[in-house]
Amino acid sequence: MPIKIYIDQGHNPQGVNAGAEGNGLREQDIVFTIGVLTAGLFNTDPAYEVRLSRPTPETTLGSTNTESLAARVNDANSWGADYFISLHANASTITTASGSEAFVYSVSSPAYGLAKNILMGLQDATGLPDRGVTVRPSLYVLRRTRMPATLVELGFITNPYDAALMSQRPELFAEGIYNGARAYFGT
């Protein structure tokens, strides 16, 4: 039985629930590409089955922020995903802020170990700092999923180096997520 992983490419292509912007880039475009590449790696491995929240660049989920988040969570829940990984790009008014970090519902969740491994994989693949795993039970996608879930901030779109790396070398982020998950699952 393959491990079912739901990859949520955070945000919509435009309008409601659009993501952060920085250095001439849009979060929703970056995470779309990284999500597709990550799914491609998982799909070459028979140990996994993957579903994307946004299978096309134009896929728009919901007409409000709440509907958009609910659509992602409901799709993962109804599919029966074993794990949920939501991909995002961070933003800060401090343009030197750099690195990857992850959020989980609780330390006791299996998502905590998965998140730690994904961050190690991202650091190995990209060289960006590992900013650690933080408990954030208020996040909708962590609170409403029926499976262990993590929200991963891949890098800072407001940092010129992080932004360039995410947009020009998205395959490094996909490899980091994939390798981190494989280390966690022991596959």
Image: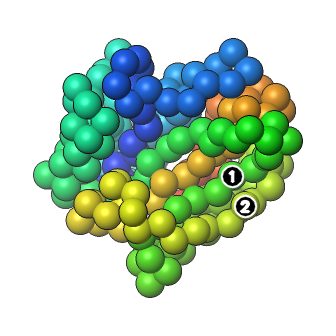
- Identify the secondary structure beneath mark 2: strand
Q: Earlier in the sequence, mark 2 or mark 1?
A: 1
Q: Position of residue 142 (x, y in %)?
A: 37, 61
Q: Residue at x 40, y 57 (%)?
A: 139
Judged from this view, the residue extending furthest toward the bottom is: 108
**Is 122 on the left-hand or right-hand side of 69?**
right
**Is 46 on the left-hand or right-hand side of 27?**
left
Q: Residue at x 43, y 37 (%)?
A: 9
Badge 2: few (under 14), some or many (20 or more) residues near its Cα, within 10 Å? some
Q: Position of residue 49 (x, y in %)?
A: 33, 49
Q: Position of residue 1 (x, y in %)?
A: 26, 63
Q: Residue at x 46, y 60 (%)?
A: 150
- Identify the secondary structure beneath mark 1: strand
- Residue at numbered disc 2: 131
Label 2 close to label 1 by CB (< 8 Å): yes
Determine if residue 162 is in view: no
Q: Position of residue 31 (x, y in %)?
A: 53, 33
| Colouring rule applied to residues | rainbow
Type of the residue with mark 1: Ser
Image position of 90 with respect to 58: above or below: below
Please identify the quarter of the rendering in which residue 162 is found: top right
* Res. 172 mark: none
Image position of 16 with respect to 122: above or below: above
Rounded to the nearest angstrom, the CA distance separating label 2 from label 1 is 6 Å
Image position of 184 with respect to 123: above or below: below
Determine if residue 98 is in view: yes
Q: Nearer the viewer, residue 115 or 88?
A: 88
Type of the residue with mark 2: Arg
**Is 175 on the left-hand or right-hand side of 105?**
right
Please identify the quarter of the rendering in which residue 115 is found: bottom right
- Residue at numbered disc 1: 100
Q: Residue at x 23, y 26 (%)?
A: 63
